Amino acid sequence: MLIKPHTTERNLIQLLLETFLALPEVHAKLSPQGSAKMPGDSEHNDQISLQVGGKSFSLLIKTKKVVYPRDARQVLWQLREFGRSQPKGQTGNGVVPLLVAESISPGAKDLLREERIGYFDSGGSLFLPAGGAYLYIDKPAPKTLSKSIRSLFSGRRAQVLHTLLVRHQEWFGVKKIAELAMVSPATASQVLTELERFDWLVSRGQGPNKERHLSEPAMLLDTWVKQVVSIRTPSVRRYYIPAMKTENLLEHIGKVFDAHEVGYAVSYEAAAQRYTPFLSSVSQVRCRLLASHASESAISELGARLVSEGANLLITEVKSPGELLFREHVGGIWLDSPIQVYIDLLHSEGRAKEMAEHLRKERIGF
């Protein structure tokens, strides 16, 4: 059953009941006892009477709108302590806490499962570990959550993530990271707030002096890689440059682009080979190119012609210098940052994924 984005608490409870009733040998209804309170909770919580395969439980429902790892930690102690104070529930009057939310992030679900705390979201995912009963349904995240997470890894927001990963050992205030990422302080602040909800940042200080530090760079990078798959791939122009040996192609392209003062950054296999040699040879050069009249002149001077196959130069045009952030000048060639090259390689073909892991181990380090 699908549920509208702005789900009310009552809608969620109803959807939970329908999910239970769709399962074999499961019966569920709102408890006539009304609501109850958990220790330290000012709100009353719904209760559901549940029977699974002849065993009875009373579910104490804690409702939230959206749950990220930080939110999960805030309620975890409450649910855990309450659960410990109740009977095991193998027969009769067992009381089991259950967190119900419109959306729960993947990281929050992992945390809750590790702590054996039940949850349910509007996408239909359900986890209920109880004495004598174990229910687990894993479904895709609700579209509202997927869209929210995906937007964090695209456009100018991604420039903030890029900055944090490249300089993951440093502490930043909002103004400083906005300058480095070439975004507005408002955008930087929004991204930092979101990352704190994932528990990927630690902070110190208060107010204008507050600083953040990326404490989970590997987790952020892994999540970015997963999100790139769902983000629209920019169009690529394919060229063939004749009368040019593969080993000389990269240097020739670099010299022509520099002569025309074109902003560019080489990525994929050619860049990885420069950073951490892995293959015996690379047959293509793939790069990001800042679109301008100068870039068109440079391509013309290269003698490059558009082709549908057999290309040895692939170009993705970018519109902002922010999309070339943290490029590095290596051996006379501008290369995309190792972070960007790694992400690109994982979505390429052939031995690109092997190159990516080699680059991450030898150059990125987390």
Image (cartoon, rainbow, N blue to C red):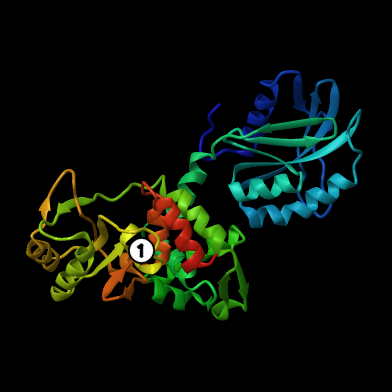
Horizontal arrangement in the rendering, residue 261 relative to residue 353 (left or right): left
**315 or 155: nearer the eye?**
315
Horizontal arrangement in the rendering, residue 108 relative to residue 32 (left or right): left
Secondary structure beneath dot 1 equals: helix
**48 or 149: nearer the eye?**
149
The quarter of the displayed image where residue 188 is located? bottom left
- Quarter of the figure that contains the C terminus: bottom right
**364 or 200: nearer the eye?**
364
Whether residue 148 is visible to the viewer of this picture, yes or no, is yes
Residue 4 position within the rendered picture, expressed as x and y whole percent measured from the top left = 51, 34
Residue 43 position within the rendered picture, expressed as x and y whole percent measured from the top left = 76, 48
Residue 274 position within the rendered picture, expressed as x and y whole percent measured from the top left = 34, 67
Whether residue 105 is visible to the viewer of this picture, yes or no, is no
The quarter of the displayed image where residue 359 is located? bottom left
Question: What residue sits 18% from the left and 66% below the top?
Answer: 253
Which residue was labeled with disc 1? 273
**132 or 269: nearer the eye?**
269
Q: Is residue 340 above or below residue 83?
A: below
Q: Is residue 176 above or below residue 355?
A: below
The quarter of the displayed image where residue 301 is located? bottom left
Q: Amino acid at mark 1?
A: Gln
